[in-house]
Image (cartoon, rainbow, N blue to C red):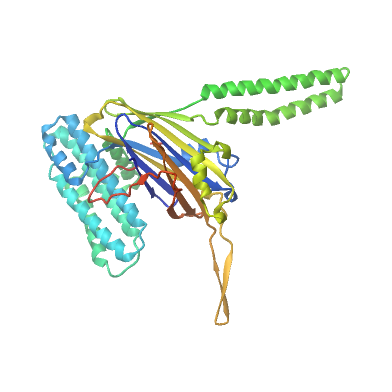
Amino acid sequence: MAKVKVKQEEALSIKFSHQMGPGDQRVFDLYFYLPTEMGIGSHTLDEEDYYHSSILGRRSYYSKGLHLPLVQSRFVSLNKRTLEEFRLYLNLFAYQFAVAIETDAKELQQNTDTSEFYPALDELCDVVTQLFKKFRRNEPNDPKWKSYFEHADNYLSWFCEQQLLKTLARSPRSADYSDVKEKVLNLCCSENHYREQECKYNSLQTQLDANRISNKMLLLRRLIQQGVVLKEELKPLGVGLKKFVTGVATGLVMLVVSALIIKAQGFFNGLTLTLLLTLAVIYGFREIFKEDFRNAMWRFIQRGRPRWSRILRDTTTQTVVAKQLVWLEFMRSQDIPKAVSDIMKQRHSQNKVDSEVLHYRIATKVTNKPFEADYSQIQEQVNFSLVPFARHLERGKAKIYKETEGNISNESVERRYQVNLVAVLRDGKQEPEYARFKVTMNRSSIIDIHESKLPDNVQPFRLESDELLPEVVSHSNPHT
């Protein structure tokens, strides 16, 4: 059974991730039920703009056996490999190390419980220290190999320092865990000294300029992604068809306009001021309705068609790993699959409100050939930002009054909205699997994501929770 990970990524974003193997054919659908009171629909939210600005994804190689001891033993044996193999496995280790630290740091930053935050931060600090020792113990001597190692080492040292400092800056206030804070700060100082004084990875000018160091590290991150993150070639579909529709719409409008002009000329004798005014009105109406008519035709023809295609390539060999088709559109109620409608009908009567349905679908066909470097799977992660939704929401203006011992006090309350989300996953010719979530949000953040119960006749798909860093290092987070 397929596994799908669902989690809140940022204050206003949700991330879905899943893995696919060679030969897999998978269709993944998401139905966002947006209450009408939110004011979001095809007239206020352009699907193409939302796709390019708020749906971000990454596809990369993934292996189920990426436990840290296994990764480390694989890295130790690199001296017997070629330079290209060394670089590939080095990038694999460094990339997943960085992503795992980033994932754990984000989870920690969302934890406001002091008794849980600082022990977890202490454990994360120990894991980082242990990994750096093992990683640097296997530094190669060959200058050709050493340059790749230094790039990865420089980036990992800087990135881990930044993540730990960022986490500490957002930590809940407490005077009881000063030893943990000091431990984290000592590790950050140690890494900074290692980078800048012992190894001299970065020049003094780069160290003193935040823009230069940030851009350099961005470049190093791209270097360690080489061979791990798949290259994406995105192409919009229906470009020629849209031009054809534009031509047909213009032709039909001109046909009507020409008929009106001929009739007006027959009605008025000669070139008169009245005829000129009539022609001006006809051309004015043409400009008003031409765009609306063209857009209506295009929406009718485009309904149910994929909007984009994507080819995923291995960045090292340039071979095609997978092909994808992507849909994104507001759906009419009559076009929604019956199973999805049945799931939504199960809601409590007070929650049955009119909604606009935004549908996202991605269909993937993975090549039958084995992946490079003995990878067993590829992983896809898609991050949906709800910021464009939040822009349409009202701020809370209401107040709740209460009386206490003869005194009247009030408290401001925020306006919250509930977005229902139905996920559908289908592998090949197997039966579809479903899941439903209730996303409670306001203008500033997602308050809660809760999985809801499905009808008895609907098959749920298994959700996989994120593993902890000490056990499994998994891929995370260009565009979907």
* x then y, percent, for residue 407: 57, 80
Q: Is residue 271 visible?
A: no
- In depth, the one of 31 and 475 nearer the eye is 31
Number of numbered discs present? 0
Q: Quadrant of the C terminus?
A: top left
Q: Nearer the viewer, residue 227 or 8?
A: 8
**Residue at coordinates 55% horizontally, 82% vertically from top-left?**
405
Which residue occupies the extreme right position in the image? Answer: 269
In the displayed structure, does residue 385 sit left or right of residue 90? right
The reply to whether residue 223 is in sight is yes
Residue 302's place in the image compared with 342, above or below, is above
Question: Which residue is nearer to you in this view: 436 or 189?
Answer: 436
Of the 4 image quadrants, the one containing the N terminus is top left
Q: Indicate whether 312 appears above or below 71.
A: above
The residue at the point 46 percent across, 30 percent down is: 308
- Which residue of the protein is positioned furthest toward the front in this rendering? 457
Q: Is residue 342 above or below residue 147?
A: below
On the image, which quarter does residue 86 sit in?
A: top left
Residue name at image x 57 percent, y 68 percent: 400
Instruction: Name the side, left or right, on which 402 lies relative to 476.
Output: right
Q: What is the x, y in percent for residue 452?
A: 44, 52
